Image (cartoon, rainbow, N blue to C red):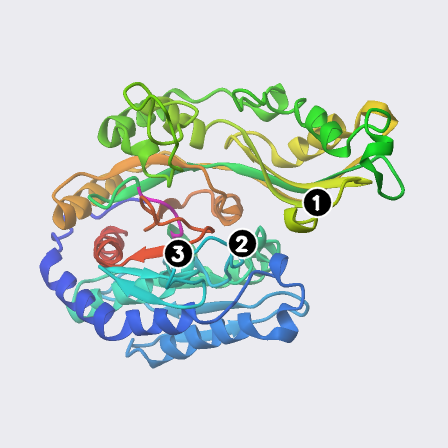
């Protein structure tokens, strides 16, 4: 896509004034209602259709979109039998711009599950506004996206700023790996026209002081590892020293994947070379953020006798800001995110348990083929099981990572201008450690499109975890910046 050579500069102040008014009077109340809906993604709510929470969330968004005074806008909930629905809106171009050149906005309305550990007075479905932060599940990931996208379009139209045709694709399956999305892309792509720019408002921010552009996303393999050594539990005094612990076997098997001392994922199949441009961007991001790259996490306090020499907090794998950025964006990492076969400690007897099942989450570098990695993970875990135990690994998700295409000069200039106008700083670029399967799908569907992935998940926002919040002042500025970038697209 090219930019017209004499596009007039777009003033940020009038856009910001309109967008702030709409956020305060309309969008924040909508997000308060949205947070109250436990619209857990299908992976976490097998009865999602019967429970109706996803339906409530998408109908709320649809009703709000329909109520906005946008000339010529068409809105519908698109449904394919047996799949989660998507919200689709289509807004004609203004200012005489071509009708066949399209900006696509992406977001999602499904949510992660509750998670424990919310501080007193907060909860996943209880919205609380505190010092500009709207706490509750899903506001930042990613309920705000549909509201921000349309607010950006409406502000441009109110100020008489020409813009391309704008299409919205808001799904309800992203937190489950977007497994329903390919079918909708096949169905809706012919209606989208010539996609010139994709704006995905579902990513992170290194700080709240400038616009952050996501340059890559890691892939993901999720699955369950089961180690079974007995048919039923037996007295640990009788079996200890004879029957190997299923948990110890699981530890041995996991050591094939990552080093338990360092966390380094060892097999070559789960690693890749880091491109030179991404290394340079990591250095630049690290220079901006410094120790905030690791201090942003809620480290547990430590109890130390020698406070003069010991840290009062638990420590990260590394404190080198460049290595922190690379570890969370371009290197593999294994986490155990759940377990079965382990009774709660207050009712755990002296019993040698028959099995241990661990839920594994293996983050993959952006260029590692996810399907091949899933197959290799299964082979590695199941091969030659210790003590001839029954070891099995079943993966339920293999999501491909994503490496952004080169940024066109017009988009780079527009991003810097939007960031300077709203924050007084240039745009910053960094990979993210999470996974958005949609980006790879859309990149394959529209290979010539420019792609802007940005978001509001900055320090302490804690998406997927307890105390998740939306930084409302930052979200307003991201909305204004988005409007300015859309106005530059031609």
Q: Position of residue 76 (x, y in %)?
A: 48, 75
Local crowd at mark 3 within 10 Å, few (<14), some, or many (≥20)? Answer: few
> Circle 2 is placed at which residue position?
175
Question: Which is nearer the eye, 292 or 439?
Answer: 292
- Distance (Cα) linking label 3 and label 1: 26 Å
Q: Is residue 54 visible?
A: yes
- Real-space Cα distance between discs 1 and 2? 26 Å
Q: Nearer the viewer, residue 151 or 92?
A: 151
- Judge from the rendering whether residue 40 lies leftward or rightward of residue 6; answer left or right: right
Q: Position of residue 173 (x, y in %)?
A: 56, 59
Specify start and end residues of the magenta stretch as a single range.
201-205
Task: Determine which of the numbered discs, if any, sits on residue 22 in the image.
Answer: none
Residue visible at 12% across and 53% down in the picture: 8
Residue 394 percent across, percent down from the top left: 74, 42
Percent coordinates x, y for residue 268 in the rendering: 61, 19
Q: Compare marks 3 and 2 and give the one earlier in the sequence.
A: 3
Name the residue tied to disc 1.
Answer: 342
Q: Nearer the viewer, mark 3 or mark 2?
A: 3
Q: Secondary structure at mark 2?
A: helix
Query: Which residue is identified by label 3?
Result: 119
Q: Is residue 390 visible?
A: no
Q: Which quarter of the rendering shows the N terminus?
A: top left
In what element is the residue under mark 3? loop
**Which is in the foreground here, disc 1 or disc 2?**
1
Q: Nearer the viewer, residue 50 or 116?
A: 116
Q: What residue is at 34 percent from the left and 32 percent from the top? A: 294
Q: Is residue 360 in the magenta section? A: no
What is the chief secondary structure element of the magenta stretch?
A: loop
Disc with the residue nearer the chain's start (3 vs 1): 3
Label 1 secondary element: loop
């Amino acid at each position: 896509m090219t930019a017209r050579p004499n596009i007039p500069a777009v003033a940020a102040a009038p856009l910001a004034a309109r967008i702030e008014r709409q956020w305060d009077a309309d969008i924040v109340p909508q997000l308060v209602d949205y947070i109250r809906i436990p619209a857990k993604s299908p992976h976490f709510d097998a009865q999602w259709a019967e429970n109706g929470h996803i339906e409530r969330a998408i109908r709320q968004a649809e009703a709000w979109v329909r109520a906005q005074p946008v000339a010529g806008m068409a809105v519908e909930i698109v449904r394919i039998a047996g799949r989660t629905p998507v919200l689709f809106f289509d807004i004609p171009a203004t200012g005489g711009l071509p009708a066949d050149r399209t900006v696509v906005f992406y977001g999602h309305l499904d949510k992660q599950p509750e998670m424990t550990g919310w501080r007193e007075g907060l909860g996943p479905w209880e919205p609380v506004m505190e010092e500009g932060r709207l706490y509750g599940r899903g506001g930042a990931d990613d309920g705000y996206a549909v509201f921000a996208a349309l607010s950006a379009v409406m502000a441009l139209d109110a100020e008489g700023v020409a813009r391309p045709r704008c299409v919205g694709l808001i799904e309800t399956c992203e937190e489950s790996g977007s497994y329903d999305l390919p079918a909708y892309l096949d169905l809706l792509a012919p209606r989208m026209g010539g996609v010139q720019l994709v704006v995905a408002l579902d990513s992170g921010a290194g700080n709240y002081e400038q616009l952050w552009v996501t340059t890559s996303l890691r892939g993901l393999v999720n699955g369950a590892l089961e180690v079974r050594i007995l048919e039923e539990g037996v007295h640990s005094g009788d079996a200890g020293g004879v029957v190997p612990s299923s948990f110890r076997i699981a530890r041995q098997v996991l050591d094939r994947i990552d080093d338990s001392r360092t966390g380094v994922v060892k097999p070559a199949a789960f690693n890749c070379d880091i491109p030179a441009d991404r290394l340079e961007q990591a250095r630049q991001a690290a220079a901006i953020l410094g120790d905030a790259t690791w201090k942003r996490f809620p480290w547990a306090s430590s109890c130390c006798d020698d406070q003069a020499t010991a840290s009062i907090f638990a420590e990260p794998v590394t404190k080198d800001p460049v290595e922190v950025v690379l570890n969370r964006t371009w290197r593999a990492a294994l986490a155990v995110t759940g377990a079965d076969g382990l009774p709660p400690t207050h009712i755990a007897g002296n019993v040698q348990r028959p099995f241990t099942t661990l839920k594994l989450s293996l983050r993959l570098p952006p260029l590692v083929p996810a399907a091949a990695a899933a197959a290799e993970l299964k082979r590695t875990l199941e091969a030659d099981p210790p003590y001839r135990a029954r070891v099995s690994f079943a993966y339920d998700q293999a999501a491909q990572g994503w490496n952004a295409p080169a940024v066109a000069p017009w988009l780079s200039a527009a991003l810097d201008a939007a960031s300077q106008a709203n924050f007084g700083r240039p745009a910053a670029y960094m990979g993210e450690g999470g996974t958005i399967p949609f980006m790879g799908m859309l990149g394959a569907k529209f290979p010539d499109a420019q792609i802007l992935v940005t978001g509001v998940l900055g320090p302490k926002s804690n998406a997927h975890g307890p105390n998740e919040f939306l930084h409302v002042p930052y979200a307003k500025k991201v909305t204004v910046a988005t409007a300015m970038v859309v106005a530059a697209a031609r």
